[in-house]
Amino acid sequence: MNGAREASISTHGGALAIAAAAATAGAVSAAIEEWSASEIIMFAESAAAEAERRWPADCSTRFARTVRNLYDDFKRLRELQPAEVAARSFPDRPMTIVPLALSLATVMDSAEQAILLAANVGGDSDSVASIAGGILGARYPDTANQGWYDTVEAVNRHDLLTLVRDLVDLRQRRT
């Protein structure tokens, strides 16, 4: 919780952003542990609620409740289409961006498909695609597009696979 807060406050320091960072960190952690979609969303919702308790904001906004409501809404849909997703939750403000990403990451089963869907929704689609794709990549690594990864790695030269191995080692030492 504190790590998510500290990572977000330099650019997104408001209480809502901290709740979003906590929810995202919780979802990634649960995805790495191979939890089910409902467990992932429950953990993300719980992390957001805890952040809201620790760093309260305007009581008219409850991020954790929005996460749950949007997940429940998307879970009922038979098929996700960009226009339908945009009509239900256009990602143009803080209360829609991360909840939409978390919902896509838990109702879909492909990182590539979630990224493509998010990219076609509009709004802050790069944030939605990054968050949903990252969580789904943790859940289903084989659904990440290798060609996209290779291009990003060739351009940025971050050696992300070494970073992933280091993070896994760090995580295993803490558990």
Image (cartoon, rainbow, N blue to C red):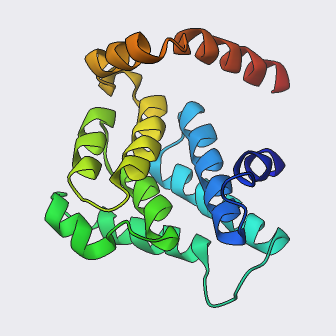
> Residue 26: x, y in percent?
64, 48
**Residue in the image at 54% along x and 50% along y:** 40
Give left or right: position of 93 versus 144. Answer: right
> Residue 39: x, y in percent?
55, 51
Q: Tell me which corner region of the image, top left, top right, bottom left or bottom right, holds residue 170.
A: top right
In this view, the residue in front, 16 or 169, is: 16
> Residue 113: x, y in percent?
24, 39
Q: Is residue 38 visible?
A: yes
Q: Is residue 46 visible?
A: no
Task: Relative to 24, say whether 156 is above or below.
Answer: above
Task: Relative to 128, say whether 157 is above or below.
Answer: above
In this view, the residue in front, 111 or 154, is: 154
**Residue in the image at 34% along x and 53% along y:** 125
Task: Relative to 74, say whether 115 is above or below.
Answer: above
> Residue 120: x, y in percent?
20, 52
Give left or right: position of 77 versus 56. Answer: left
Give left or right: position of 119 versus 13. Answer: left
**Residue in the image at 54% along x and 38% along y:** 31
Give left or right: position of 1 versus 29. Answer: right
Q: How many marks on residues?
A: 0
**Residue in the image at 48% along x and 55% along y:** 38
Where the C terminus falls, by quadrant?
top right
Q: Tell me which corner region of the image, top left, top right, bottom left or bottom right, holds residue 56.
A: bottom right
In this view, the residue in front, 148 or 62, is: 148
